[in-house]
C-alpha cells in the first residue's frame, strides 16, 4: 500500500518505521528538515519538506494515488484540514487523523464525509487513560490489553518467587485451576522470548504473557505471584488532558487527588471534576507529598508532558513510601532505563497509539493490533473469513494451521445464539468462519505471513 504520513514526531516516525519494515510505500511529510533527514537515513522512506495541509505539498507527496493518509502532526486543525483536502481534491480512500482536543471529540457528528471527512479518529490521551484504567483493575499486572470488546484480555505479569506455579511446568496450570481455562502466549526471560510448551518451567523473574477471559484474569495472576490488595488511594501528578480524563474515570471508584502547577488549570479541573481533590503545587515538592500522606498512597501516577519531571517526581514518591508508581514517558530511550527499578510501570503513549493506528492500515480484517515489547512483538485480533475451500484457517484444527515461526494462537471468540463464547486455543479447536482469532507474535516481522494466512483466496484448495 502507499501510505502518506503527516508529522514526523514520535508517533509519525515510529509508525513510518513500523510500516516501512513491512514493505509498504511510505511518504513522510514534515516541516522539520533535520528530523526528516535523520529518519530517511535510518529507514527506507520518501520524505517531503513542507506544511502538512498545503495541497501542493500533498501533491508532492503523491497523495493522488495514496491508499491511506495518516495525519498525526501536533496540531489538530492541521490534521483535520489535511483530511478535508485529501477527500475533496484527491479522493483518498482512507483518512486517519490524530485529534487531541476534547472540545472536538465530544461532537462525533463532526467527523463524517458531510462535515470533516475523517474515517478514523485517534486520540492518544483517550487511549492512554483507558490503558491506565485497565492497569488499575488488575494490581500487579505490567500490561493489560483488551480483545473482543474486553471479553478476552492479554495480561503481562512478572513471575515472583512464592507464586504456586513458579518452579513448575506449565502443564500443571490446569491441575491447579481445573475450572479456569487460560493460555500462556509467550515468556520473556532475561529479555529473550521463549515459546511456551507444556514442559516449560516458569522461573522467578520471567515476564509471562497470558490470555484468559476477563473474569479469570485474577485467578491466573494468583498462580504467578502473590495477589496484591486492590487500590484505594491515588495521586495524579499533572492535570493535563490525560490527567483529567483519568481522574474522570477513577474518581467514583477511588480516592483521587491531582497535583497541578498552573493555578488557572486547577480552577478548571475543580469545575470539571466532582469528587477529585485538586492541589495547586509541584509533584516534586517533598513537603506537599508528605502533607498529602504519600506513604499511604496506593498508586502515584506521573502524567505531565515533561519526562524528566515525571521520572523525578516518581522516584521521590516511591522513596517517600508510595506503594506503586506508574510514569508516563514519551522518550522511548528512557523506558528501558527506568522500568522495573524504582518505577514499577513506564507507560509509553507512542506504543498505545501505534497499535491503534496499525489496526487500520493492515491488510485483512484486523480488529485490534497491540504493539508490545517496545514494538518488537505484537498481539493481533483478526477475523477468519471464507470456508474450507477458500481459507487457509477455516475448518482446520489449530494444530494443523501453518503459523509462522514465533507465532501462536492464544484464544478464539465465537458468536453463538447464546452470545459470545471464549475458547482457549487448544490444539483440537477448529476455527470457524467469523471467529475472532487472537494471535501473539514474538517477532512482529512475521505479521505479513499472518495477514496472508487469514486472507480469503478463491484459488485456494
Image (cartoon, grey):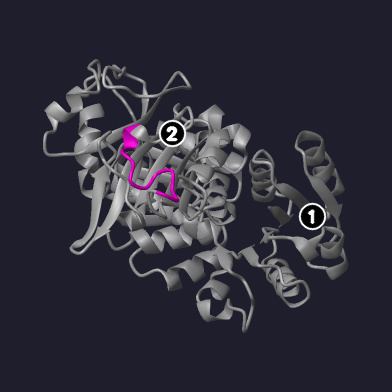
* Image quarter of residue 103: bottom right
Question: Who is closer to the viewer here, 353 or 18?
Answer: 18
Q: Nearer the viewer, mark 2 or mark 1?
A: 2
User: Which residue appears at 29% of the width and 19% of the height?
Assistant: 202
Report the residue marked by disc 1: 29
Up-down: is 118 above or below 249? below
Q: Quadrant of residue 221?
A: top left
For mark 1, does the 10 Å Cα neighbourhood hold few (<14), some (14 to 19), or many (20 or more) residues?
Answer: many
The dominant secondary structure in magenta is loop
Where is residue 182 drawn, in percent x and y?
24, 37
In the foreground, 42 or 389: 389
Q: Residue at x 70, y 64 (%)?
A: 75
Start-end of magenta stretch: 389-399
The answer to whether 274 appears left or right of 310 in the picture is left
Q: Nearer the viewer, residue 203 or 289?
A: 203
User: Is residue 110 or residue 245 the one in the foreground?
Assistant: 110
- Left or right: 460, with 149 as reference point: right
Residue 151 pos. (x, y %): 29, 53
Query: Is residue 78 found left or right of 275 in the rendered image?
Result: right
Q: Secondary structure at mark 1?
A: strand
Q: Secondary structure at mark 2?
A: loop
Nearer the N terminus, badge 2 or badge 1?
A: 1
Q: Is residue 86 magenta?
A: no
Q: State the mark number for residue 402.
A: 2
User: Residue 267: x and y, percent?
Assistant: 50, 69
| Residue 50 at least partly seen | yes
Amino acid at each position: 500500500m502507499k501510505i502518506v504520513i503527516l508529522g514526523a514526531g514520535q508517533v509519525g516516525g515510529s509508525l513510518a518505521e513500523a510500516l516501512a519494515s513491512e514493505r509498504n510505500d511510505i511518504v513522510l511529510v514534515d516541516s522539520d528538515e533535520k528530523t526528516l533527514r535523520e529518519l530517511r537515513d535510518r529507514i527506507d522512506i520518501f520524505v517531503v519538506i513542507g506544511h502538512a495541509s498545503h495541497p501542493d505539498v500533498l501533491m508532492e507527496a503523491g497523495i493522488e494515488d495514496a491508499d491511506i493518509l495518516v495525519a498525526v502532526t501536533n496540531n489538530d486543525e492541521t490534521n483535520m484540514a489535511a483530511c478535508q483536502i485529501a477527500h475533496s481534491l484527491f479522493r483518498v480512500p482512507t483518512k486517519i487523523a490524530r485529534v487531541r482536543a476534547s472540545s472536538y471529540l465530544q461532537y462525533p457528528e463532526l467527523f463524517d464525509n458531510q462535515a470533516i471527512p475523517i474515517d478514523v479518529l485517534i486520540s492518544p490521551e483517550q487511549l492512554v487513560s483507558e490503558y491506565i484504567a485497565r492497569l488499575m483493575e488488575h494490581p500487579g499486572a505490567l500490561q493489560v490489553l483488551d480483545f473482543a470488546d474486553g471479553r478476552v484480555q492479554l495480561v503481562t505479569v512478572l513471575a515472583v518467587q512464592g507464586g504456586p506455579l513458579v518452579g513448575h511446568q506449565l502443564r500443571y496450570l490446569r491441575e491447579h485451576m481445573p475450572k479456569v481455562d487460560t493460555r500462556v502466549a509467550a515468556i520473556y526471560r532475561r529479555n529473550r522470548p521463549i515459546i511456551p510448551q507444556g514442559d516449560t518451567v516458569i522461573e522467578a523473574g520471567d515476564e509471562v504473557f497470558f490470555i484468559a477471559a476477563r473474569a479469570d484474569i485474577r485467578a491466573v495472576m494468583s498462580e504467578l505471584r502473590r495477589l496484591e490488595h486492590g487500590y484505594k488511594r491515588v495521586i495524579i501528578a499533572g492535570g493535563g488532558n490525560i490527567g483529567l480524563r483519568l481522574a474522570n474515570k477513577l474518581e467514583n471508584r477511588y480516592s483521587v487527588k491531582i497535583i497541578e502547577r498552573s493555578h488557572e488549570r486547577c480552577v478548571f479541573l475543580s469545575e470539571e471534576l466532582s469528587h477529585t481533590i485538586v492541589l495547586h503545587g509541584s509533584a516534586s515538592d517533598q513537603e506537599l507529598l508528605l502533607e498529602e500522606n504519600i506513604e499511604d498512597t496506593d498508586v502515584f501516577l506521573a502524567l505531565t508532558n515533561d519526562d524528566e519531571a515525571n521520572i523525578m517526581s516518581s522516584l521521590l514518591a516511591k522513596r517517600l513510601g508510595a506503594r506503586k508508581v506508574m510514569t508516563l514517558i514519551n522518550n522511548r530511550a528512557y523506558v528501558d532505563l527506568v522500568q522495573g527499578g524504582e518505577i514499577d510501570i513506564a507507560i509509553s503513549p507512542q506504543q498505545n497509539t501505534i497499535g491503534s493506528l496499525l489496526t487500520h492500515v493492515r491488510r485483512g480484517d484486523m480488529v485490534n493490533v497491540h504493539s508490545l515489547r517496545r514494538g518488537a512483538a505484537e498481539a493481533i485480533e483478526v477475523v477468519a473469513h471464507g470456508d474450507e475451500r477458500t481459507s487457509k484457517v477455516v475448518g482446520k484444527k489449530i494444530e494443523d494451521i501453518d503459523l509462522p515461526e514465533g507465532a501462536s494462537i492464544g484464544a478464539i471468540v465465537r458468536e453463538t445464539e447464546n452470545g459470545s463464547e471464549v475458547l482457549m486455543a487448544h490444539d483440537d479447536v477448529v476455527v470457524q468462519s467469523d471467529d475472532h482469532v487472537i494471535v501473539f507474535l514474538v517477532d512482529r516481522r512475521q505479521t505479513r505471513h499472518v495477514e496472508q494466512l487469514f486472507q480469503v483466496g478463491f484459488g485456494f484448495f
